[in-house]
Image (cartoon, helix red, strand yellow):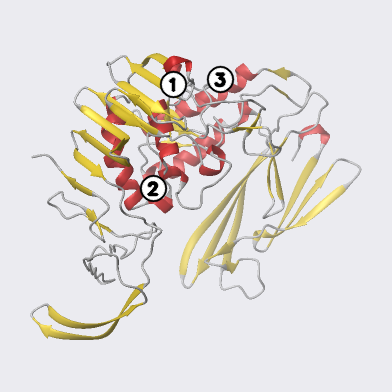
Amino acid sequence: MSLEGGCRAAISLGPKGLFDSAIAFSDGVRCVVFDGLRAAVLKHNIAADFSPVTTKAVTTSGGGESITVKHDLSLAGEDFELTADIRAEKAGFTEQGEPVKAFLNEGRDARSYRWRPDHIMAFVQRNLKLIKPNLKPTHYFIDVFTAIDCFDYYDSSGNFHSMLETRKHWGEAFAWVRDYLGGDAPQTSEAGHDQLTGYIEGADCQHMTLSARQGWPHIRVSSKDWQRVPWFDAVLHDKFSLHGVGYPSRYKLEQPTTTRILESDDYISAEILEGHAMMIDSRGFGRGAVRKYWLAQDFIRSIATDTIETVEFSDGNIHRQIITWKSDAKVYVNRGQEDWAVAGKLLPEYGYFAKNGSIESSIERIDGIIVEQSNGPSGVYVNSRTFNPDGTLPIRPSAEALEYLGDRQFKMIVDWDVQRPAPKDLQIFSHFTTDKAPSRAKLPTVWPTGSYFHCPFDGKGRTYDNSAIYAQTKP
């Protein structure tokens, strides 16, 4: 097999195909040989001497720059196939003729090299033809493509290719995926630069912190003062949807110990400022996700395809911003340390007031207390913020005995280890699950946030201590 730069590769298959093969690479002077490929089925090494995975037959097809190796395997009496496609692909080169290094997986000590943009389509098509009939996706995310720049590159012959070619090939790959999946399936990627606008619909957002310190992840800039502004959305909000305002470690260098970044007033006020789809992570599944949804989703949905008309610094203060949308929606965001009285509200640091017709959402100060509330099509939501998800009470229950009384009734004796009295009367909520349910669906008794949120079908909901959140849907 011919490779770039006059190099060649050869594969000598063993009785178990690629898994006990010899794979050699040579530049005509030196040669390196690899002893097969590692592969396992249900943790059983195929190439092991006494592997329970039996290789019944190995067949090859193709030649030249593309070889397919099919392995007919058997495990515990079940036959199956494992096929590998081997191609001589072309990497992108520097002006000096060196292959461009890409991601280094330090855990596997594996170095990747940057693919030439004009050689990715075949692999995208192969993957989707395997994925579509089995997973039936209606949306597709391909990592990295909007996280790195559309770059210039050279081929192995020294020919220059501009970033415009890179953008064209990448965009065409996304367009092919959309057409292949059908239904105008949305296409998204990572971090969200604007070069593929029109080819893809959006991306997660990575708006980083400005800091003079060395290192990453942040933008290294020394400044007397700075503030986030909706610069991207002022141009592309209706054409390119951004999700959140950054991973926690990239959004804020100093991580608070009491509040998760994605659920903080700082983060939420930035999402409202820019009009982005709200972000939550796995640690926020449960109470955190429900809270952000009730607080701001109605407003965010109302401006999802809207455009920004004006962005104003109130009295020239960059930390007090007023955003006016084409729909006449209005947003006031205070990211300064001093309270800001505006539009009949008193906004604390990271407070905001957003209004679009009858839809309202705010984090504000009322009678000296910072509270949050919203009013929209989904209902009325108020939160006096009296619940602290990190304030676990030193009370531990344990079930000592369980007696079935018949007719789906039982008696349970519970011992309570109370190290300190509760500050107020509390309700006890017990949730029972079973692995024998037909759907095998289970609800956790404690969410990852440290609280339990229960919402029955009548639309009322509250946390397990009955004091943090109360919402009632409109009739």
Give the residue drawn at x 11%, y 85%. Answer: 405
Quarter holding the N terminus is top right
Q: Residues within 10 Å of mark 3 (few under 14, many from 20)?
A: some
- Which amino acid type is shown beneath numbered disc 2? Asn
Residue 461 x, y percent position in the rendering: 20, 52
In this view of the protein, which residue sits in the foreground, 45 or 104?
104
Relative to residue 444, is residue 67 drawn left or right? right
* SS at mark 3 in the image: helix
Frontmost of labels 2 and 1 is 1
- Residue ID for mark 1: 233
Using the rendered image of the protein, determine whether residue 361 is visible from the camera's viewpoint: yes
Tell me the quarter of the picture where residue 415 sits: bottom left
Identify the secondary structure beneath mark 1: helix
Q: Earlier in the sequence, mark 3 or mark 1?
A: 3
Q: Is residue 70 above or below residue 383?
A: below
Q: What x and y, as percent, mark residue 125?
A: 50, 35
Q: Nearer the viewer, residue 40 or 235?
A: 235
Say above or below: 77 vs 450: below
Q: Give me the C-alpha separation between circle 2 and circle 3.
A: 29 Å
Mark 3, residue position: 168
Type of residue at label 3? Lys
Closer mark to the observer between disc 3 and disc 1: 1
Image vertical order of residue 156 relative to residue 107, above or below: above
Residue at mark 2 = 134
| Amino acid on which the number 1 mark rests in the picture | Asp
Q: Locate residue 351, reporting x and y percent.
A: 37, 33
Which is more N-terminal, label 1 or label 2? 2
Q: Nearer the viewer, mark 2 or mark 3?
A: 3
* Residue at x 67%, y 73% (from the top left corner): 49
Quadrant showing the C terminus: top left
Q: CA distance from mark 3 to mark 1?
A: 23 Å
